[in-house]
Amino acid sequence: MSLIQNISSLSKVKPEYQILLNQLKTRVKTYFATDLIAYYLLGSVGRGNDKPGVSDMDIQIILKRKVSDEDEAWINKVKSEIEPKYSALERLDIGLIDVKELDEPDIDKLKFILTTDSVLICGEDITNSFKSFVPSLELAKILNNQYRNTLDEVINYLPEPDEEDQNHPEYIKDHVRWIAKNALRLSLGIIMVDQAYYTRSMEEMADKFAEKYPIYQSQIQLALLQYHQPTNDLNQALAFLNELSKTIYQLADEKLIKLEKRREIDG
C-alpha cells in the first residue's frame, strides 16, 4: 500500500500569491519573533490547482507558546487588510497552534495535512517526526472526525444564524460550500474503507464515488455542484443538506462506524 506523498511546493504557487506569502512572512516573523516555530501554507494553493472564487488560502502557524487573545486580534487585523486585495481567494484562513497541542489525538487531521499537503514558508519543519499515512479506515476516520455532528449543527444553524451572520448576506452560501466540501471528502473516506485510493481532486472524488456507488450518483454530483456554485437560498440549502444526511452520510455511518465496531467484535 503506497504512502500518500506531499506534492506541494512553493514553485507551484501563483506569482501573486507568492508575493502575499512573502509579505505575510515578514509580518509573522516580526510579530511572533522567537515564539515562532514554523509558518506553513496548506492545501490547493501550494499544489497550484486553486480555483478563483472557490479556493481558500490556508495558513498554519506553529508557536512555542499558547495562543493569546492578542494573537487572535492580530490575525483578524491581518486578514481584514489582506483579503480585500485578493478577490480571487474565497478567504484567507490563518490558524495558530501551540506546538504542544500537536501531541493530542484530535490533532491527527492537521498533522496529516502538514505531512502530505503543505509548503514550509519559514521556520523549522516539524513534520519529520510525524507518522506516514496510507489510505485506510483509520485515515478515513481521522479526516472525517465528527462528520455527522458537523452536518447536523449546520442544518440547525442555518434557519437561526447568530447576529454576525444575520448581517452577512452570503452566510448560507458559505456554509453550503463548507458542507459540500466535507461531503466530497467523506465520499473519499468511504472509498478508502475498501480500497487503497486517495486523491486531492474534488472532481476525482465525485467520479470515483459515483463509479463505486452509482445509486448515489445524483447526490455526489450535486455536492460537487454546490461546492463550485453553492446556493444562497435557505430552502434549497436545507433540502440539499437533508438529502446528504439520508444518503451519503447514512452510508458513511455504515462504513466508518458500524464496520469498525464489527471488526472490533470479530477482532
Image (cartoon, rainbow, N blue to C red):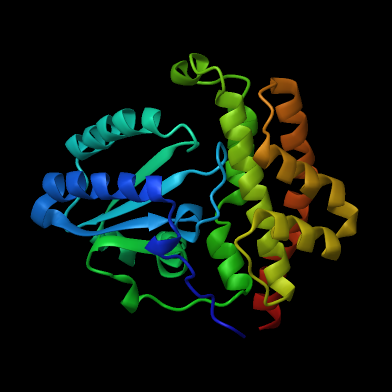
Q: Is residue 266 visible?
A: yes
Nearer to the camera, 42 or 126: 42
Please report the residue visible at 78 percent of the width from the left and 59 percent of the height from the top.
207
When the figure is inspected, residue 149 is found, relative to residue 88, above or below; the finding is below
From the viewer's perspective, tell me whether residue 157 is left or right of residue 75: right
Q: Residue 135 is drawn in which quadrant?
A: bottom right
Please report the residue visible at 58 percent of the width from the left and 19 percent of the height from the top.
160
When the figure is inspected, residue 123 is found, relative to residue 227, above or below; the finding is below
Residue projecting furthest to the front: 15
Please report the residue visible at 9 percent of the width from the left and 56 percent of the height from the top.
34
The quarter of the rendered structure image containing the N terminus is: bottom right
Q: Position of residue 11 (x, y in %)?
A: 40, 63
Q: Position of residue 61 (x, y in %)?
A: 28, 53
Q: Residue 36 is drawn in which quadrant?
A: bottom left
Q: Position of residue 260 (x, y in %)?
A: 66, 70
From the viewer's perspective, tell me whether residue 98 is left or right of residue 192: left
Total tally of numbered discs in the picture: 0
From the viewer's perspective, tell me whether residue 167 is left or right of residue 18: right
Nearer to the camera, 40 or 130: 40
